[in-house]
Amino acid sequence: MTSLAVLAGALIMALSSSGSFAPGHSIPGSPAQVALEKANRHFPEEGGIEGDVLFVAPNGAKINDESVVRQMRAVMERMQAVDVVAEVGDPLDRVSEDGRVAVGSVNFDLEPGAEVDPAQQEAVRAAGAAFNDQFNDHGGRVIFGGDAFEEELAPFGTPEAIGIAVALLVMLITFGSVMAAGIPILTAVLGVGGSVAGTLLATAYFDISQHALTLAIMLGLAVGIDYALLIVSRHRAQLTRGMAMAESVAMATATAGSAVLFAGLTVIIALAGLTLAGVPMLTSMGLAAAGAVALAVLLALTALPAIMSMAGNRLRPKPSSRAARRALDTESRGFAVRWLDAVIRHPRKVMVAVVLSLAVVAIPAAQLRVALADNGSAAKTSEPRQVYDLIAGAFGPGVNGPLPVLVEGDSVAEINSTAEQVVDIVKPMSGIAEVNEPLIAPDNQAAVVNIVPATGPNDSATSTLVDNLRAALLPISAESGSYVAVTGLTATSIDVVDKTSSALLPFTIVVVGLSLLLLLLAFRSWTIPLKATLGFLLSVGAAFGAMVAVFQWGWLAGVLGVPLVGSVPSFVPIIVMAVLFGLAMDYEVFLVSAMREHYAHHGNAHEAIRAGGRNAGRVVVAAAAIMITVFFSFLFSHDPNVMPIAFALAFGVLVDAFLVRLTLVPAVLKILGDRAWRLPRWLDRVVPKVDVEGQDLAKDDSIAREPELVS
């Protein structure tokens, strides 16, 4: 009850004092962002948030026909009367060559970084109702797009709710008890509620990416259910063996809870490590997700034991139940044991087959191409996407991503001279569709030369063009002494992509080093960390390869509802790597710690593999099934920024749990034998002892051993 009260209070506070999410397509101090801030000061009328108003003439008519023009003028006048609208642009200034399409603009008088309220969007849309009423039956229409009309997708909806329902079904099959299945769902939902409240509150004080909340919900649900699953399963197995309820709660929290704490810290450290990239968007996403995991761990170690105590002996399986029989049968020949027996009979063949298979799946990853998602990546049925496509078709793809060049100087004459040099140098360059004449700022201290590329904002050729423009403009700036820089949202987005991409390799090195260190501490072995890290890299490579096949090559894109094939958002690879690292280490800890514990008690490397599979294999299977279900449900959010993350995580967990941890790991351990559990003497003296599963708390083997997940 206390948790519910705290959660309710936090949500009320968050909803009443939350701010707005940051757009996330800039890096403070980047060349394009610095130039953009300068341009906004010189051209204050260009500030605020701008949207596009696109008119399509009715069939058989032209956009400049008198009846059409009259209705367009009426639409723009009604929009100008809306309170938050600062200025509207004449659509007749931008008419397509065939005379069928015209594009006007609407500028909202809002603070930089603010978002247009849905009610304000609807007020502006209502201004076009008369135009649509008159011409819609004949093919004419007015639609709204651009930054001001971006659709804000809910971070949680029906697909995600279905995912929770499927996870509950998995829990019911796992435990055979409604109460035992419901408790992990309850604690996970409590954790997600707290994460939502914390993230919303943070928006009032920090720049939080709009995708941070979705990632926090996704990961909070997945790990919240899994961590509670591990503790509840151990508690029920101990109850089956006759342990007293209060003692069992304490023992499960101390042993399985220790594993949860270690696993959770691994995920938190990996996610917090995203701050090293120096990209505000990644920082907010990483910290929000890390907070969700921290809350899941906290609830698993505090609220969960309280709930288990309240449930009392109702969690104890009936003596005649299937759950009780499995928990008491130490010679169980369940699926996990049969699978491990098959693996360790032919370990070398299995190892080669798994490594080669995952290497083949990872091959497409070499062609991974990243960009920042925009309205061109939105669902085809959305208005912003329709406006984006119509503008690209009528005026060329580059119109959706202009590249203004800002020129600053001490006098109008100097500014004009420098701007003319820019025009002369830029016009002959390849990849440019149009170069406009310089526009002098109202303060007479700057000018803008607007460049329209021949390719779209997310085309790799546009990124190359920005690099070429910057190289060509450097001599002009050096000779004239004027400030000359490429700016605009497209250039700032390209800077974000470059910064994010350059951070991937250092982050990979940090993650790999971290995994080696953590597993060295956990298992006091040098071979297990090395094997686990190589397995993690195989899982990540396979996840990236599958992601490229779907989101770049288009395999199964139609079935999965992918709105645009061509690239993935630039932050996706590093986010996927951070999350998969944490989850892979979770499964490694859950599985290998059970094997290590048996080996520590009996010294038989072969039987340790079988016992670990029997005791923890079903935990990994159930946990992975729940994770895959939760991640896969977010694939149907139709958010182009979330879909690649959800798919890559679902596929990565599938590969890591079943092919790496339950197949490759036992095969390698079988080949290594006793060598897998040894540490050189000099290293043994240096490495501190970490009791991951609280093994020293119990002397009796039947209590200390990680119990099989009952069902």
Image (tube, rainbow, N blue to C red):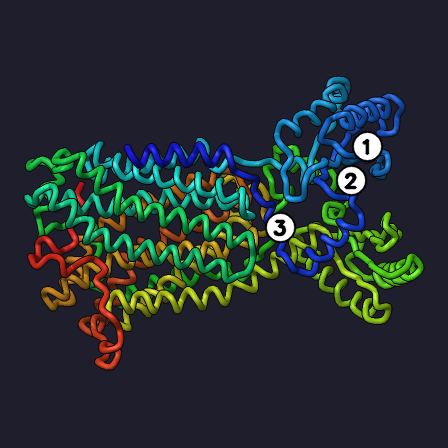
Q: Which amino acid does label 2 sit on?
A: Ala
Mark 3: amino acid: His
Looking at the picture, how far across and down is residue 497, in whole percent?
60, 57
The numbered mark, 1 or 3, whose residue comes first in the sequence reads 3
* Residue 262 quadrant: bottom left
Front-lying residue, 281 or 388: 281
Where's residue 120, x and y in %? 66, 28
The amino acid type found where label 1 is placed reads Arg
Instruction: Give me the disc on residue 556.
Output: none
Q: Is mark 1 on a helix, strand or loop?
A: loop
Residue holding disc 3 = 25
Q: Mark 1 points at which residue?
A: 100
Q: Quadrant of the C terminus?
A: top left
Q: Mark 2 points at which residue?
A: 394
Please tell me how crowded label 3 is: few (under 14), some (14-19), or many (20+) other residues with Cα within 10 Å. many
Residue 501 percent across, percent down from the top left: 56, 61
